[in-house]
Amino acid sequence: MSETPPESAANPDFDAMTRDIAEVPAVEVIVTVAVNLMSAAAVKLGLTEEGYAHKDLDEARKLVHALAGLLDATATEISSFHAAPLRDGLKSLQLAFREASLVPDEPGQGPGEKYTGAVYG
């Protein structure tokens, strides 16, 4: 007996999805994306329970850089209530990257530092 997905799973209701997205404030979308970037970067930096199993500094660099760019681009669009903890998380990731690197970047050359300025340990 083969199972076929329900009609709704095979043909998602894009109108309903669009209405749902339309109701979400831009700040919430930005913060959600930032948190997803932070989480992915933490995994790639080996900061999770599984540690080194998923460590990939090249991928982490890209994610941290993207997070820094997003926060820089939206600094005036989101309140400090949202921005401050995101900036703190970014700095923690930048420091973790610097500590994890066998050959550290020059100050100001680490991931995202073109947006945040040099990060020192």
Image (cartoon, rainbow, N blue to C red):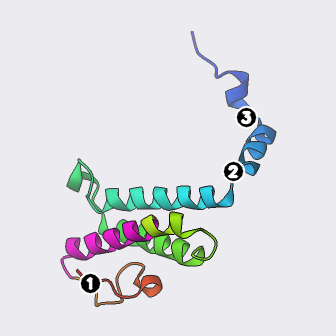
Q: Residue at x 52, y 73 (%)?
A: 71
- Residue 85, quarter of picture: bottom left
**Mainly helix, strand or loop, the magenta region?**
helix
Q: Give the camera-side residue of 81 and 83.
A: 81
Asked if 17 appears above or below 106 in the picture, the reply is above
Residue under circle 3?
Answer: 12
Q: 10 Å neighbourhood of mark 2: few (<14), some, or many (≥20)?
A: few
Q: Is residue 7 left or right of residue 79?
A: right
Disc 2 from disc 3: Cα separation:
19 Å
Q: Give the camera-side residue of 115 and 13.
A: 115
Q: Position of residue 88 (x, y in %)?
A: 38, 69
Q: Residue at x 61, y 56 (%)?
A: 28
Q: Which amino acid, mark 2? A: Val
Segment tinted magenta in the rendering: 86-103
Q: Give the camera-side residue of 63 and 27.
A: 27
Mark 2 or mark 3, whichever is nearer to me: 2
Residue under circle 2?
Answer: 24
- The label number, if any, that marks residue 120 in the structure image: 1
- The label number, if any, that marks residue 84 in the structure image: none
Disc 1 from disc 2: Cα separation:
37 Å
Q: Is residue 10 left or right of residue 73?
A: right
Asked if 48 appears above or below 99 in the picture, the reply is above
Residue 89 lies in magenta, yes or no? yes
Q: Which amino acid, mark 3? A: Pro
Q: Earlier in the sequence, mark 1 or mark 2?
A: 2
Q: Earlier in the sequence, mark 2 or mark 3?
A: 3
Q: Position of residue 70 (x, y in %)?
A: 54, 72
Q: Which amino acid, mark 1? A: Tyr
Q: Residue at x 42, y 61 (%)?
A: 38
- Residue 75, quarter of picture: bottom right
Q: Secondary structure at mark 1?
A: loop
Q: Residue at x 54, y 55 (%)?
A: 32
